[in-house]
Image (cartoon, rainbow, N blue to C red):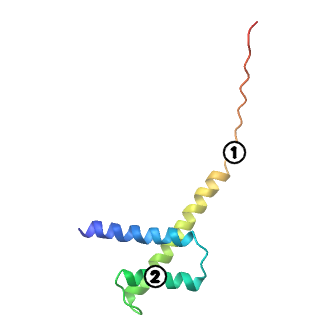
Amino acid sequence: MNISRNAVLLGMVVLAGFLSGCQTMTPEERRAADTRTCMGYGFKPNTDGMAQCLLQLDLDRRADMRAFEARSAAMWNQPVILERHVVVERQ
């Protein structure tokens, strides 16, 4: 059961990272949202657990951004191949 609970927790953190990337938030708003998220997981303010939770949320967000940038670069930096089919009819 611990494995499934951890998977759900990780999924929620990743989802929070994706959702926070979809909106324009000030750093203060993002920190407040991250703090609320970590408190929702049961972490108490000003503890090592809270600091680790906030750090993990930030690292996940940065990893998501790097992955997005890598996918975008791979998609847009590819050569464009145009094919032109010529149909020749015999008479």
From the image, state whether disc 2 or disc 1 is nearer to you: 2
- State the image quarter where residue 72 is shown: bottom right
**Residue that carries the numbered disc 1 in the rendered image:** 79
Vertical position of residue 73 compared to residue 55: above or below? above
- Please provide percent x and percent y for residue 78: 66, 48
- Rendered view: 14 above or below 46: above
For this orientation, the residue located farthest to the bottom is 46
Residue at 62 percent across and 53 percent down: it is 74
Residue in the picture at 45% in, 68% down = 14
Is residue 83 shown left or right of residue 65?
right
Residue 74 sits above or below residue 47 on the image: above
Residue at left offset 57%, top offset 65%? 66
Q: Residue at x 50, y 77 (%)?
A: 58
Residue 46: image x %, image y %? Answer: 42, 93
Report the Cα–Cα distance between label 2 and label 1: 41 Å
The amino acid sitting under disc 2 is Leu
> In which quarter of the view is residue 53 placed?
bottom left
Q: Secondary structure at mark 1?
A: loop
Residue 42 locus on image (x, y percent): 34, 84
Classed neighbour count for the residue bearing mark 1: other residues with Cα under 10 Å, few (<14), some (14–19), many (≥20)? few
For marks 2 and 1 on the same chain, the one whose residue lies earlier in the sequence: 2
In the picture, the quarter occupied by the C terminus is top right
- Residue lying farthest to the right in this orientation: 91
Mark 2 is surrounded, within 10 Å at the Cα level, by few (under 14), some (14 to 19) or many (20 or more) other residues, namely some
In the current view of this chain or complex, which residue is farthest to the left?
1
Q: Amino acid at mark 1?
A: Pro
- The residue labelled by disc 2 is 54
